[in-house]
Structure formats: structure tokens, C-alpha cells
Image (tube, coloured by chain):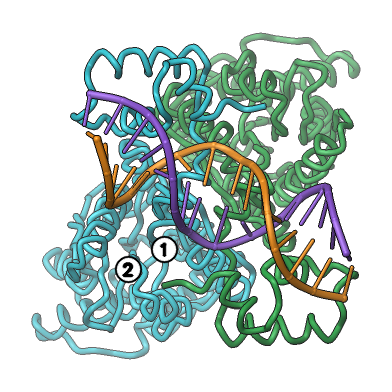
Chain colours: A green, B cyan, C orange, D purple
Amino acid sequence: MPVTIKDVAKAAGVSPSTVTRVIQNKSTISDETKKRVRKAMKELNYHPNLNARSLVSSYTQVIGLVLPDDSDVFYQNPFFPSVLRGIAQIASENHYAIQIATGKDEKERLNAISQMVYGKRVDGLIFLYAQENDPLVKLVTEEQFPFLILGKSLSPFISLVDNDNIQAGFDATEYFIKKGCSRIAFIGGTKKLYVTQDRLTGYEQALKEHKLSLDSHRTFFADEFLEEKGYKFSKQLFEYDPKTDAVITTDSLLAEGVCNYLNEHQLNVPVLSFDSVNPKLNLAAYVNINSLALGRTSFETILQIINDVKENRQICYRQVIAHEIIEK
Amino acid sequence: MPVTIKDVAKAAGVSPSTVTRVIQNKSTISDETKKRVRKAMKELNYHPNLNARSLVSSYTQVIGLVLPDDSDVFYQNPFFPSVLRGIAQIASENHYAIQIATGKDEKERLNAISQMVYGKRVDGLIFLYAQENDPLVKLVTEEQFPFLILGKSLSPFISLVDNDNIQAGFDATEYFIKKGCSRIAFIGGTKKLYVTQDRLTGYEQALKEHKLSLDSHRTFFADEFLEEKGYKFSKQLFEYDPKTDAVITTDSLLAEGVCNYLNEHQLNVPVLSFDSVNPKLNLAAYVNINSLALGRTSFETILQIINDVKENRQICYRQVIAHEIIEK
DNA sequence: CTGAAAGCGCTTACAG
DNA sequence: CTGAAAGCGCTTACAG
């Protein structure tokens, strides 16, 4: 039989409600009583039943993380573990637990978060991916359930934490322009993702601003098999223009494919890739998107949102996490 | 106000207990009543409060995942996301949710799992790392709480899911021996991990069996900065014996360091690495440890254990996941 | 400063 | 085949 609050109350010679107040460290309880109750809790190795607590107080101290599809490239790149670490750090500091929602398709994930939201298992949700008209996002919006997106969203009133990917794409491109490059290629992931679109936009803006011509033969987008595509696109690229003098990739896997091609063909063309951590390739530079900060800020922000909702404030947060270009 | 079981009962003209029975799909309820109740649930968009359910039924349909330290190399290599995917697949199939426990040190993680276990927030725990005399393992053992280790343990009565790493080390070494190599080096991660120890043991056994001498100058172990160490150790290795004719590494980061060294020095020595997925390096071969299966089997096994404990059976499971050597 | 009572939303015997 | 009652372990007003 597990120890309940009644056992503690009996042992300390007080009522259960007093024990609750001691746990909440209410100032109305005398120090002497607090001491006695705490001693009893320790001696009996008391731990509150969190389900009971959540049932009555209707908060859980749990945050849900919505992950993209199983199959997603997401898991393959260092972004995910890094963001997770950031999230876990702040969660731990605030004594929050983390629950995760995955599933092989949208239906499964919708089920998972329905359980969390309607089942009152979490206080808020962080979406680790962004998609327009996402039915999961629709659900939490309608329920006015606290959530935020780690990434971009077109809806103007959704809280989010993200890099300025347009600026980052601009900076990356300008980095090469300032080095004197003028035939700069852009090899990105799927255009379905805003990250890709935005970085491309930045790339285009930089070219324009520096009076360089846009050439659609220099841009490529891979939906899958990023490494192979990186290789294949490089081939196409250099067949089209052997004088290509710089390559920007949006993902470290793509960068690997590109670098492999360049190595094999002994081409000495600088590559710059977006990546979060641990850039291992022979790159000229990379864009540090600071995924640890993305994770940390996401968690800090969701805690604020939960508080806001509780106090009937409706604030939309838009947190921009700085990126930086690191030369190697 | 959220919809409760009473609302459903009222709408369907039955008692709350009947609604519960319909949810549990008990055969004692008439089809006609079931139909009526289900209709009411749907119309009212009823979702049970899982905290209330857990409070009385004392099961949660949640499994806890214990992750190693924040800073651990763990997150850097593809093993983690891959295992997680396997776990998430089976969890989803069984309508289980996943909660994770991390923390920057042992104390934080102990806190996290105490909350889960004592707070009755999970039905069982999967440890994603193994360490001897782990206080967390001690806690769950003492509490007779369902758990298993994904990895090795010396304690004979702990359930676990793992590769046969001794055999895998043996196979990797024999692979090179059969190719005619005789000066085979072993570059591993920290000796604190059983994986490293076991793979080393297999390496040594293979050498012995093939009458090749053991030479401690050919073995290296890195506690951190795996890639740099891989590079540094390669340097030492080839200074010691320029005729080294094969290298085995236990980790893809180490392998990268090694490959970098070999490339730079134009050495054409075959490298074999342990790795789970997506081996991108220019390796001669790699050992597929099948981390997806590790994840899937872990989850299936913890479900069995939970059932066993409920029915007062105490069974210790030892699941071996096959590895295979893949030539490139 | 503290206690007694009511209740959170379920499920589980018990009874019919 | 179904309902009324009791209870899971907490917390929250209310009262003093």
C-alpha cells in the first residue's frame, strides 16, 4: 500500500489539508507545523499521487512535444536531439515532465494529442514542426489550448519560436558574394517546408541586392534521400555550369552529398550549409541556427503562455533566435 | 466546462457505470445500449479524463523513457532517433503515450523518475542506457516497478534488450581476418560502457582464435570528443605501426575522425564501424545493430513485463537483437 | 493558523 | 443486463 496524504497527516498529527498547505509552502502555516509535517513526509517516504493532484487542480506539470512523422528526415539530422536537449533543460529546471506524441501518420498523431489534450494529460503543447492548415494545430486552437510552434506559421496569431530564415539565407548568400563569388547555387530540402522557402527567399534577395541574376538552374530541392540528391544535384549543377563558384545547402545531409561529389571530381568549390551542431564536413562555413536556444526558448515561452491563459490574457509571442555564420 | 461521463450517461439515459462498461466494451452490455451510449459520446465529443481513470484504475497507459545525461554523446549519433522511432511505433499501436526523463546529472534524473514512479504517472520504464549500480535502477528494483534496460546489465535478473556485442565485435574482426588482414586496430568509445568492453572482448577473442597476437598499442578508448580522438588515435596508431591494415571503430563519430586522418594522409586502409543507420562515411563495411528493432522489442517487452507484474509473475526477459555486417 | 466537508471524474464491487 | 454507492488521493473553499 502506498503512503497517502492521510498517513502523513496522521503521523504529523494534523489534517490532510494542512499537509497540502505545507507542500504548497503556504505562509499561513506555522514553521513548527511545517517542520513536523516535512519530517513525517520524509520518514514515510511520501510522494503525492500526481493523478489525484491533476484531477482536482487541473494542471499536470507536463508538456507535450509533437514530433513529425516517423519517417521524416527530421530525426536524421542533429537539429532534433539538440532542440530536445534545450527543452529538457528548462523542463527540468521547472520540474516539468515531457510527454511526446508521434505516429506514422497524421491520424495517429491526432489521436495522440487528443488523448493528451482532452485527457488532461498535459498543460501545453510544443509543435516541433510547422505545416500550414495542420489539423492538429486546428484542434488546439479551437480548444484554446496553450501551444506554440517551433518554426514558422502563416497564421498571424500563433505563438512561435524560430530563426529568421530569410535573413539567414540572405547572410549566407552575401557571405559568398563578399568573397567575390557570383555563380552561387542553392540546394535545399523540400519546398513544402517554410525553412526551405525562406532561406531561398533570402538567397534571392541577396542576389538581387547585389545585382546578380537569378537563375533557376542553380536552385534545387530534394524531397527525400537528401544525401543522394545532394550528389545528384551537384552533378546536374556542374554539368550546367562548370564555373559554379559556391554552393549553399540547407541541410547537413545535402551538404554531404555535395561534398562527396566535389571530392570525387576534385572540385575545389566552397560549400556553406545550414546546420545546428557538430558540423563535420569539409565546409567553408556553416550557419549556426542555435537549436539549443530554440529548444530552451520554446519551453520558456510555453510556460508563459500557460500562465497567460490561466490569467485570461491572450498574448501572441514571436521569438526570434539569432543565427550566426561560422567560418571554418 | 468539459464533458464528463455523467453528461454522456444523462444523454444516453443510462448510469455512469454503464458508460464505463461501454468504453471497456464489456460483453454484458446489450448492443442496443452500446450503440446509444457511443452515439452520445460522439455527439458530446466526450473524452475521458485520464487522470481520473488512472487514479482509480492505477494504470496510466504511459511508458517512461530514461535518457542519459544531456551532454552525452548519445544524442549525437543516429542510434537514439532510430531507437526512439521503434519505440514510438509500438507505443502508438498499443495506444500508449511516452514520457521522457532527462536531466543534466544523476540527481535530476533520479528526481524525474521518482516523480514518474511514485507519482503514478507511468506503468513502466525503459532505460536507454546501462550503467552498473545505477541508483535509478536500484530505485525501480526496490519498488518492484516494471522496467527493462536497453543495453547490458551484469545483474542476472534484470530484463533487457540488447545486441550480442561480443559476437558483433568478433564478427567485425573476423571479417577483416578473412580478408587477410593481421594488423587490426580497435578504436572504441569509453570503457565505462559495456558496449565498448564487449566489442573489445569479441575483437580479442577473434584475434586469439586466429592466432593473431594481442597488442595493446592497437587499442584506443575515447571518453569524449569522439571525432577529434578518432583523428588523434589514428595518428598514434600509424606512428606506432605504419603497416596497420584495418581499423574497427565502435562509433560513427570515431570513424569520421579516423577517415579524416586516412584521407589527409592518403592512406588506403579499410575501416569498419558500428553504427545503426545512414552510414555516410567511406567505410569498407559497417555493423548494422538494428536499432529500430531494439526500440520495438523493448516496448513489446515492457508491455509483457507490466502484464507479468500485474499477474504476479516474475519473468526476466533477455532479448537479443541480431546484428549484421554490411559490406559497402 | 488549522480542520471538516465537499468534490474532481472516473471505476469497481455489490446488488438486483 | 444495469444501477446506486463507495472510494481512488488529492485540493479548495468555508468556517472558525
Check disc 1 and give the amino acid type.
Leu
Q: Secondary structure at mark 2?
A: loop
**x 56%, y 65%: residue:** B115
Along the line of sight, which residue is nearer the eye, B159 or B275? Answer: B159
Asked if labels 2 and 1 touch by Cβ distance under 8 angstroms, the answer is yes
- Where residue A169 sits in the image (x, y, percent)? 77, 28
- Where residue B161 sits in the image (x, y, percent)? 26, 63
Residue A97 is at least partly visible in this image: yes
Counting other residues with Cα less than 10 Å from the Cα at mark 2, is it few (<14), some (14-19), or many (20 or more)? many
Query: Which chain hosts label 2?
Result: B
Quarter residue A122 falls in: top right
Q: Is residue B95 above or below residue A6?
A: above
Check disc 2 and give the amino acid type.
Gly
Q: CA distance from mark 1 to mark 2?
A: 7 Å
Residue B128 is tagged as 1
Counting other residues with Cα less than 10 Å from the Cα at mark 1, is it few (<14), some (14-19), or many (20 or more)? some
Q: Is residue B302 above or below residue A157?
A: below
- Where residue A62 sits in the image (x, y, percent)? 62, 49
Quarter residue B155 falls in: bottom left
Residue B178 falls left or right of residue A306: left
Query: Which chain hosts label 1?
Result: B
Quarter residue B270 falls in: bottom left
Residue B112 falls left or right of residue B133: right
* Residue at which label 2 appears: B151
Q: Secondary structure at mark 1?
A: loop
